[in-house]
Image (cartoon, rainbow, N blue to C red):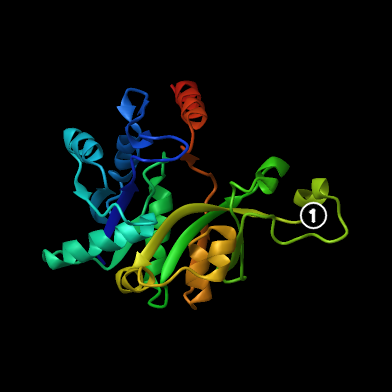
Amino acid sequence: MRVLAVIPARFASTRFPGKPLAVLGGKPVIQWVWDSLAAVEELAGAVVATDDERIVAAVQQFGGRAMMTSAEHRSGTDRCGEVLRRLEEAGEHYDVVVNVQGDELFTRRSQIQSLIACFADAGTQIATLKTAVRSSEELLSPNNVKVICTEGGRAVYFSRQPIPHLRGAAVEQWLERQPYYKHIGIYAFRSETLKEVVRLKPSPLEVSESLEQLRWLENGYAIQVRETESANIGIDTPEDLAEAERQLLAKS
């Protein structure tokens, strides 16, 4: 099974313009993401997919592979779809594509391996990760997407609100009475599935929650969810970068 990692990276972020090139611990954020994949021997290749020449230049400078993609894409998934199509046209073949966002720092080798392992089951179309919610602040924040699954690990629903609602208990008691899970936004797609989902139109639930994975559920695609012990660090604001810097210093 040949697996490709694609790292979508946009320069024009509303809350943090240029964040893939922001410097953390002496190297750009995008390099941290690239380096986190270097130890995953199950990967047959990796590509940074961007719409900005400055990011291409930075990736090439540290020895990575980058591809300019359309500025019209609305999501990282769409950018992954373009990369897959163009590589196939150039004669490269991949069975699975892993989408690792360009601001997901310190992605663990075990996380990528866990996703790839899902595709040993021929019925797996899409795979992603979850981790336990550990505080009421995490649970209530709309920036943390929550997920509920079947006993077999298939996603039932994703929401920015706490799910399930625990009737008859104060919110402060929910974590004591019910396990809650936060979605980790790393996806893996069977290549044929990726080609299909990028052709889907936005769906009502997706528009309501601003979560593209709901489009896939509404269209009947199965999403397998594996649990991981720890959440990665997502960089959305300069404050997030400062926190990542503090954590990095604490580890050194």
User: In the rendered view, would you say 160 is above or below 59?
Assistant: below
Residue lying at 81% horizontally and 49% vertically, measured from the top left:
171
Where residue 39 sits, quadrant-wise, is top left
Circle 1: residue type: Arg
Q: Residue furthest left?
A: 90
Tell me, yes or no, if residue 120 can be seen here: yes
165 and 236: which is toward the camera:
236
Q: Locate residue 245 relative to residue 142 in the image: left or right.
A: left
Residue lying at 37% horizontally and 54% vertically, measured from the top left:
76
Residue lying at 47% horizontally and 53% vertically, measured from the top left:
185
244 and 8: which is toward the camera:
8
Tell me, yes or no, if residue 42 can be seen here: no
15 and 164: which is toward the camera:
15
User: In the rendered view, would you say 35 is above or below 210?
Assistant: above
Where residue 74 sits, quadrant-wise, is bottom left
| Quadrant location, the N terminus | bottom left
For mark 1, what is the residue?
177
Q: Position of residue 121 (x, y in %)?
A: 40, 74
- Please rate how many residues cluster around mark 1, counting C-alpha atoms within 10 Å: few if below 14, some from 14 to 19, many from 20: few
User: In the rendered view, would you say 235 is above or below 92?
Assistant: above
Q: Position of residue 52 (x, y in %)?
A: 25, 42
Q: How many marks?
A: 1
Where residue 42 sits, quadrant-wise, is bottom left
Q: Position of residue 35 (x, y in %)?
A: 30, 39
